[in-house]
Image (tube, rainbow, N blue to C red):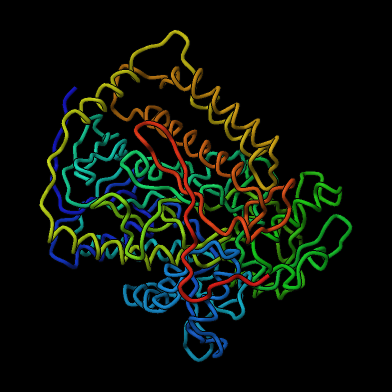
């Protein structure tokens, strides 16, 4: 099996908001940049972000400022955030939003022409800038246009299976080109990982098919550390009916515009759970909906109602254009009927441990966006994810470009390439007892949803852990693509590799969740229902010692506020 070799200075893996912003910034420094994505450009998960992007502009409430945004973020993250990262996020946020505007993004406006800002969960002030309810789509169009304008080389439908390393430094990457069926060895001085989340390990998720945790496993295998992997956010509101729409996101913008949650009795049940009602932190709202359903006050489909019928219809159609059309296709006119919603797996707060410039423990390896841990702590605020892609995408792109100007190119270890070629060769050899990707994904998703989802216990987590061990030993070795005669557009071959990544990410999540014997943010242990700042105000950090997975504890970085409030 042969391969093509391509050289570049900065290799960016991932074509979402973070990867595109990194490419734009790196291209400003007169270095060669190549961006690869496993889907078509513009199809990344960022395009599905609807509600808005946070920035303490003070356009609607002049009392808002970076410190208010900082407090909301750290309190919402239950104090597990690394505060140096949060400080960068909130201080640089306004400039990154203005960058988007200068590139051509068209945001909604206030009557006096300023960027409009709507209320979002756990926010002291309205600070979420938006484009109706398709903000992520507008941002992605803007970033894609800018990348094209800068003539950044983009390679679509290319799946990176391994980062190549030498002397604890990144030297490139090994990839499979789905279009041609060929293999590519990238030689690069720096790599930026921005491949997004891993929501596809859950049965019900708002994430696209591409969210399989690839970057986290690439980083781990290269020698980087993973942090807070137990912290996975469940968005409170996703569609539940009809079944074909289950998990489709219902933006927080609905509640930001005044939508209210009702149980089957017509009660506005959030009055029982939090003073901020529907705009409480996402983890609180998700658990509240879960309780209503578990205690028999949910709908026949396992959800609750989200209603905007009390709002002026013209406002709903203008501010919630996507939601209006989305539910019309399901036979619901949201100006007249309530939406049926329930929580769904949504966003990974855990990820690769990095500094404020995206630098990891591996020389030349940078991360940005949902790949990066520490920014959101135990629970992300709505509107902070899009902001993180821009703030840390810019920083990672700039840092990587400056790094390559001062670095020599590491030699590529050909033995690593040989191992990857052998792996692919083994996958495309027929097997009489092969297992299908669909069956494995379905089994994993159900396991994770029921045992390591919104609520967790020692018993439920142990069951999932045991099942995953069985899958690793008895099922994954037999996982094969149905088509073994050709590599050309062999999508199921990629799905097999993605499934390996999903199972490994799920394993680390479950192990972390068992270790953290408290409840904090999105991590809700029914057997340890309280937050324990005395024993658990620390990160669980994973790394590889040879081939053995190990963990250690690291303190939370507290640069501004030293102790959490009770």
Determine whether, in the image, residue 556 is placed left or right of residue 13: right
Q: Is residue 237 above or below residue 296?
A: below
Determine whether, in the image, residue 414 is placed left or right of residue 458: left
Task: Please state the horizontal and vertical placement of residue 493, each as a whole percent of the image.
Answer: 37, 27
Task: Please state the horizontal and vertical placement of residue 235, each as a whole percent of the image.
Answer: 62, 55
Residue that protrudes farthest toward the left in the picture = 408
> 45 and 63: which one is in front?
63
What's the residue at 66%, 58% (across, down)?
A: 532
How many numbered tags mark residues here?
Answer: 0
Determine whether, in the image, residue 31 is placed left or right of residue 142: left
Determine whether, in the image, residue 170 is placed left or right of residue 554: left
> 192 and 210: which one is in front?
192
Task: Please state the horizontal and vertical placement of residue 395, each as a whole percent of the image.
Answer: 31, 66
Task: Please state the horizontal and vertical placement of residue 378, each as a whole percent of the image.
Answer: 57, 58
> 410 and 421: which one is in front?
410
Q: Is residue 483 above or below residue 216?
A: above
Q: Is residue 177 above or below residue 387?
A: above
> 496 and 92: which one is in front?
92
């Amino acid at each position: 099996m042969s391969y093509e070799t391509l050289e570049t200075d900065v290799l960016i893996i991932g074509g979402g908001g973070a990867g595109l912003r990194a490419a734009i910034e790196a291209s400003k420094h007169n270095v060669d940049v190549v961006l690869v994505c496993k889907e078509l450009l513009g199809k990344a998960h960022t395009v599905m972000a609807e509600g808005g992007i946070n920035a303490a502009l003070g356009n609607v409430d002049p009392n808002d400022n970076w410190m208010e945004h900082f407090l909301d973020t750290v309190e919402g993250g239950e104090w597990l955030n690394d505060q140096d990262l949060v400080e960068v996020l909130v201080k640089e946020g306004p400039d990154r939003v203005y960058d988007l505007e200068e590139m051509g993004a068209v945001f909604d406006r206030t009557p006096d022409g300023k960027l409009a800002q709507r209320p979002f969960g756990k926010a002291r002030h309205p600070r979420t800038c938006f484009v109706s309810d398709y903000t992520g789509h507008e941002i992605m169009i803007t970033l894609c246009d800018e990348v094209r304008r800068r003539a950044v080389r983009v390679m679509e439908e290319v799946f990176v299976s391994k980062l190549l390393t030498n002397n604890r430094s990144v030297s490139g990457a090994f990839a499979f080109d789905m279009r041609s069926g060929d293999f590519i060895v990238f030689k690069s001085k720096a790599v930026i990982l921005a491949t997004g989340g891993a929501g596809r390990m859950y049965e019900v998720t708002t994430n696209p098919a591409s969210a399989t945790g690839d970057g986290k496993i690439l980083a781990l295998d290269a020698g980087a550390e993973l942090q807070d992997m137990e912290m996975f956010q469940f968005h409170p509101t996703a569609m539940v009916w009809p079944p074909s729409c289950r998990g489709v996101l219902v933006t927080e913008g609905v509640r930001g515009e005044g939508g209210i949650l009702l149980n089957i009795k017509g009660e506005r049940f959030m009055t029982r759970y939090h003073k901020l009602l529907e705009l409480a932190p996402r983890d609180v709202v998700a658990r509240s909906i879960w309780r209503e359903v578990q205690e028999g006050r949910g709908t026949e489909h396992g959800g609750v109602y989200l209603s905007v019928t009390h709002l002026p219809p013209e406002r709903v159609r203008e501010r919630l254009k996507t939601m209006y059309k989305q539910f019309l296709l399901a036979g619901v006119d949201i100006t007249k009927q309530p939406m049926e919603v329930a929580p769904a797996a949504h966003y990974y707060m855990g990820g690769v441990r990095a500094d404020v410039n995206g630098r990891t423990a591996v020389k030349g390896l940078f991360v940005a966006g949902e790949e990066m841990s520490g920014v959101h702590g135990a629970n992300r605020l709505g509107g902070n994810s899009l902001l993180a892609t821009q703030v840390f995408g810019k920083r990672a792109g700039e840092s990587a470009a400056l790094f390559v100007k001062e670095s020599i190119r590491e030699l590529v270890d050909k033995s690593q390439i040989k191992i990857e070629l052998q792996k692919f060769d083994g996958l495309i050899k027929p097997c009489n007892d092969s297992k299908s990707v669909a069956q494995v994904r379905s089994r994993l998703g159900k396991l994770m949803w029921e045992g390591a989802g919104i609520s967790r216990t020692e018993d439920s987590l142990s069951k999932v852990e045991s099942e995953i061990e069985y899958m690793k030993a008895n099922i994954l070795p037999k996982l094969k693509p149905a088509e073994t005669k050709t590599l050309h557009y062999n999508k199921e071959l990629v799905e097999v590799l993605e499934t390996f990544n999903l199972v490994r990410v799920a394993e680390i999540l479950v192990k972390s969740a068992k270790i953290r014997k408290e409840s904090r943010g999105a991590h809700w242990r029914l057997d340890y229902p309280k937050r324990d700042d005395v024993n658990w105000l620390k990160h669980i950090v994973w790394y590889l010692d040879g081939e053995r997975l190990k963990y250690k504890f690291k303190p939370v970085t507290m640069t501004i506020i030293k102790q959490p409030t009770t």
